[in-house]
Image (cartoon, rainbow, N blue to C red):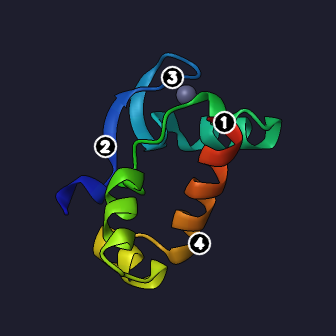
Amino acid sequence: MPSTGRTKGKCLRCGHYGELKARSLHESCYAAARHAGELDRYPLTRPGVDLAEADRLEQEGLATDAIARRQGVSPGAIRTARHRRKHTA
Ligand SMILES: [Zn+2]
């Protein structure tokens, strides 16, 4: 997937244009946001867990590990996303 490389754009934290690390933030802004516990304020831009798809695959009998491999994420990422959904729904 070509979208996994570094992208350029406007940083959501400081508003300056530059190379973004993740969540539309500069590397330094990402680190600052993480340090401040504010990462959840910024949207995930990395290829992530598609929970609807994960649920569908699970109904087909796939294990979490297999679903994770299909989505190019770690099994832990799927568990985290499910956990987060339960607490934010
Ligand atoms: Zn920034």
The secondary element bearing badge 1 is classed as: helix
Say which amino acid is labelled 3: Leu
* Mark 1 to mark 2 CA distance (whole Å): 29 Å
* Mark 4 to mark 3 CA distance (whole Å): 27 Å
Q: Which residue is mark 4?
A: 76
Residue 33 vertical placement versus 76 (above, below): above
Q: Earlier in the sequence, mark 1 or mark 3?
A: 3
Say which amino acid is labelled 4: Gly
Q: Which residue is mark 1?
A: 88
Q: Residue at x 61, y 40 (%)?
A: 30
Task: Give whichever of 2, 75 is nearer the camera.
Answer: 75
Q: Position of residue 19 (x, y in %)?
A: 39, 39
Q: Does residue 60 appear left or right of residue 15 in this picture?
A: left
Asked if the beta carbon under badge 2 is closer than 8 A to the nearest atom of ligand 1, the reply is no
Frontmost of labels 1 and 3 is: 1
Q: Residue at x 18, y 59 (%)?
A: 2
Q: Earlier in the sequence, mark 4 or mark 1?
A: 4
Labelled pair 1, 2 in contact (Cβ < 8 Å): no
Frontmost of labels 4 and 3 is: 4
Asked if the beta carbon under badge 3 is closer than 8 A to the nearest atom of ligand 1, the reply is yes
Task: Give whichever of 32, 37 is nearer the camera.
Answer: 37
Labelled pair 2, 4 in contact (Cβ < 8 Å): no
Q: Which residue is mark 2?
A: 7
The secondary element bearing badge 4 is classed as: helix
* Mark 1 to mark 3 CA distance (whole Å): 23 Å
Frontmost of labels 2 and 4 is: 4
